[in-house]
Image (cartoon, rainbow, N blue to C red):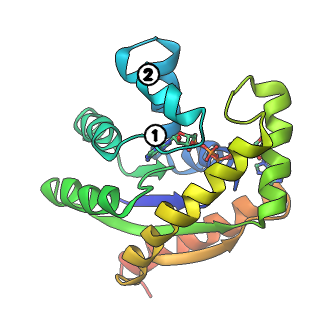
Amino acid sequence: MFNLILFGPPGSGKGTQSEKLISRYNFKHLSTGDLLRSEIHNQTPLGLEAKNLMDKGHLVPDEVVIGMISSALDANLKTNGFLFDGFPRTSAQAEALDKLLELKKTSIAIMLALEVSEEELVQRLLKRGVTSGRSDDNNDMVIRERIAEYHRKTAPVADHYHKANKVVMVQGEGTVDEIFNALCSEIDKRITEINGTV
Ligand code: B4P
């Protein structure tokens, strides 16, 4: 199983690139943002709690997202790899993910971290807010709070994987195809290393 984390601040293109990557590599896509929006759409108690936090630009509690990921892993054991998009977002989530994967006798092969400037992030999210109907995208203050949450709680997650030598930084500004090609080249390199042909 080849498992990868697509990492980066809100609006860095994780969702955009994930769609293309799953179609090329046939990974199982696990996006905690999508899973939470589906709970909100279905008006479940979990969705109502999550919406309240997401609309303020805050993260949803660790136990909620870890529970969602644990169920999703169990439901997809036959995949040839997972693409984690927007997860893990805290150090506690990263530790939980390592343990869940270990139980399944697998691990993270690589973390690809998209680098995008703060002004570009804000512009992209405001632009998406015009058409997406996402309430966390149409307010400059909420977007900046999401970016602040990222610096406070999510950026340290990269250190966790740095220690294991699994992080590769990728330029996240440019055309979608340029960024996609850079991501594919890093994935292909890692697959080759793992297969021991280098
Ligand atoms: P997410 O759904 O994960 O999404 P995101 O951070 O908004 O953005 P992403 O990086 O996927 O951006 P995208 O590709 O779409 O999170 C939403 C919220 O859910 C969080 O704030 C949090 O509250 C909660 N949550 C989710 N996971 C959680 C967790 N694990 N723990 C706790 N809480 C959690 O791109 C954005 C825009 O940029 C798009 O409009 C796109 O078209 C555009 N774009 C993409 N690439 C571009 C490029 N190269 N050039 C120009 N524009 C580009």
Residue 79 placement, left or right of 178 = left
Q: Quadrant of residue 28?
A: top left
Mark 1 or 2, nearer chain start: 1
Residue 58 placement, left or right of 99 = right
- Where residue 32 is drawn, which disc sits there? 1
Q: Residues within 10 Å of mark 1 (few under 14, many from 20)?
A: many
For ligand 1, tell me if the residue under mark 1 lies within 8 Å: yes
Q: How many marks?
A: 2
Q: Nearer the viewer, residue 92 or 81?
A: 92
- Residue designated by label 2: 47
**Quadrant including the N terminus:** bottom left
Hey, what amino acid is under mark 2?
Gly
> Mark 1 falls on what kind of element?
helix
Rendered position, 139 above or below 165: above
**Quick check: can you spot residue 178?**
no
Q: Residue at x 32, y 35 (%)?
A: 68
Q: Residues within 10 Å of mark 2 (few under 14, many from 20)?
A: some
Residue 138 placement, left or right of 43 = right
Residue 4 placement, left or right of 133 = left
- Where residue 91 is drawn, which disc sits there? none
Hey, what amino acid is under mark 1?
Thr
For ligand 1, tell me if the residue under mark 2 lies within 8 Å: no
**Rendered location of residue 98, percent (x, y):** 25, 62
